[in-house]
Structures are given as C-alpha cells and as structure tokens.
Image (spheres, rainbow, N blue to C red):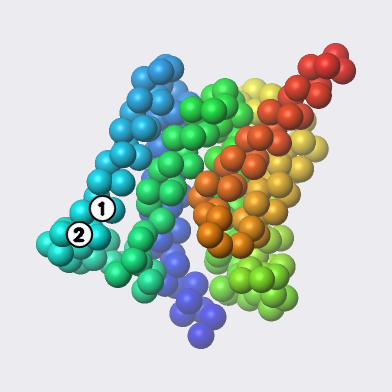
Amino acid sequence: MALAQVRKEVPRTIFHVLGGVFLACLGYFLPSPLNRALLGGIFLTTLIVEGGRRYVPFIKDLTNRLLGVLMRPSEFDGVTGTPAFTCGVFLAFLLFSKEIALASLIPLLAGDRAAVLAGKGFGRVKMGDRTLEGSLAFIAASFITYLVVSSIVPHAFPFPWTILLAASVVGALAELLPRPMDDNLTIPLATGGFLVLVGRIFSHLS
C-alpha cells in the first residue's frame, strides 16, 4: 500500500522539481526586473487557468485529461497547488535578493518532495497530518541540495553550512503549519525571512 502511494507521487515529484528548477533559473539568471515580471506573468497565467477550471467545464475536462497523472484526487474537482507554487516562487524573487530567493526555494523543491515520498513510504510517527520521518527527510534533502548546488555554483549562498542547515530546519517547520496555510508559500517565505534576519545580524556583528 505504501509503495503504491509513493509510485503515485513520482510523476508529480518529477514535475514539481523540474518545473521548480526552471522557474528558479528564470528568477536567478535573468536580470531584474525582467525576472520578476516574467515570474509574475506565469503566476497570473496559472490563476487564469485555475479560474477557467472552476467556471468553464471544457477547460476543467481538458486539464484533467492532460495533467491527471500529476493531480491528486481532491484536485480533479478542487483547486490545484500550481497557483500557490508559482506564487511562492514569484514572491521569493519579489521580496528577497536573488541569492536569498534561490536559497529559500531549495527546501520547497527538494525538501517538500522528499517529505512527501518518505512520509507516504515509511512514515510512522504522526505530527498532525505530517510524519516525523517526512520532516527528517525534508531537512536531509534540503541540506544535501544546498551542498550540491554550492559545489556547482560557488558562492550561490552567502552563508556557512551551519546556517544552511538551520534554514533546512526552518523550512521543515514551515511545512508543518496546518491548513489553510499552504506550504508552497510558507516554506519559501519562512526560509527567506530567516536568512534575511541572519544576514542582518551578521552585518551588525561584522
């Protein structure tokens, strides 16, 4: 049963990670304010499509057929997570510097999906509607991804590894917030806010 649940999440995970990496690259490598305008346009497009799904049966049927493999049962007749996800990426680059925005998205892209797969695969200790195993996988995946990205793009994150580990924990805590808080928003905003605060503390101490 657990393995079947994990398998159902694999296509969604691939789409989540690849789509998120694409959006993060747009935000990080394109100059400002072009990056913000483009990410804002993508967010508005997802809102329009979501509105179409709600009020236009043809659009709803079409998206359900084309994207059904990526959707959870509740999303066929309800709201999908796409607008919140694109909004989270847009807000990260709107509110934070590029470096902090990128750092705030790592837990959303890597940690969140690791938590889902671990929680559904072998989660036993419940914490609300989450699991302890999922949260630990979230922290581990986020931190490892920070280290990998740092090795590929030196100085991508202007923080020591201890702060990146702490950011991974902050992201995991943000993911635990109950509904109606959407973790597509809470994870990047909480992580980015934490890194901004740490950066200001370091600047005052130096």
Q: Which mark is residue 51?
A: 1
Q: Residue at 33% x, 28% y: name it.
A: 38
Q: How many labels does the image show?
A: 2
Q: Can residue 66 be seen in this view?
A: no
SS of the residue at dot 1? helix
Quadrant in the picture for residue 123: bottom right
Q: Where is residue 132 in the image (x, y as percent from the top left)?
A: 72, 68
Residue contact between numbered discs 1 and 2, judged by CB atoms under 8 Å: yes
Q: Which amino acid does label 1 sit on?
A: Gly
Q: Residue 55 carries which label?
A: 2
Determine whether 81 is above or below 20 in the image: below
SS of the residue at dot 2? helix
Q: Residue 196 carries which label?
A: none
Q: How crowded is mark 1: few (under 14 residues within 10 Å), some or many (20 or more)?
A: some
Q: Where is residue 193 in the image (x, y as percent from the top left)?
A: 66, 35
Q: Residue at 81% x, 22% y: name it.
A: 202
